[in-house]
Amino acid sequence: MSDPRLEVFPGAGDWVITKAIAICLLGGAIVFAVLLCGCVAPDGQFVESMRAFYDRVEPSHRAYLDGDGSLDGDQRKRRHRTLDAADAAIRAAEKEIAAEEIE
């Protein structure tokens, strides 16, 4: 028998374990649903808005990164790579939409 002073919910017993399992299963279902949503290609209007947002924010954010003295070289490079990856993802989506329009 366990020490009752160490129990988080004294007397709860199996109910706490059952609730934890239910929460984990629900969380797994939510993650699965989100992953399925990622399989749908974005539409043209969404990609256009992402391009407009990126083009508006990127120059000032890149200048901020270059001028931020609190960042070391590796931190700055990682943040620049994040900006470059966002641009690459938008370009890939633009190419995909252009290819769909041709078909």
Image (cartoon, rainbow, N blue to C red):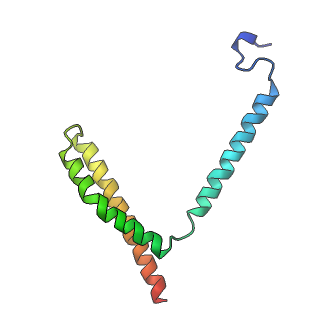
Relative image position of residue 5 (x, y in whole percent): 71, 10
Residue at horizontal 50 percent and vertical 70 percent from the top: 42
Q: Is residue 58 above or below residue 8?
A: below
Percent across and percent down for residue 99 are 44, 83
Marker count (numbered): 0
From the viewer's side, name the closer residue of 5 and 44. 44
Question: Is residue 68 at all visible to an observer of this figure?
Answer: yes
Q: Residue furthest bottom?
A: 103
In the picture, measured across the screen, residue 71 lies left or right of residue 38, that is: left
Q: Residue at the spot x=45%, y=89% of the render? A: 102
**Does any portion of residue 3 appear in the rendered image?**
no
Where does the image place residue 88, in percent across and percent down from the top left?
36, 65
Q: Quadrant of the N terminus?
A: top right
- Name the foreground residue: 54 vs 21: 54
Residue 43 shown left or right of residue 15 in the figure: left
Q: Is residue 73 shown above or below 3?
A: below
Q: Position of residue 76 (x, y in %)?
A: 25, 46
Residue at the image point whose x is 72% and y is 17% from the top: 7
Question: Relative to 73, is 44 on the left or the right?
Answer: right
Residue at 81% x, 28% y: name it: 14
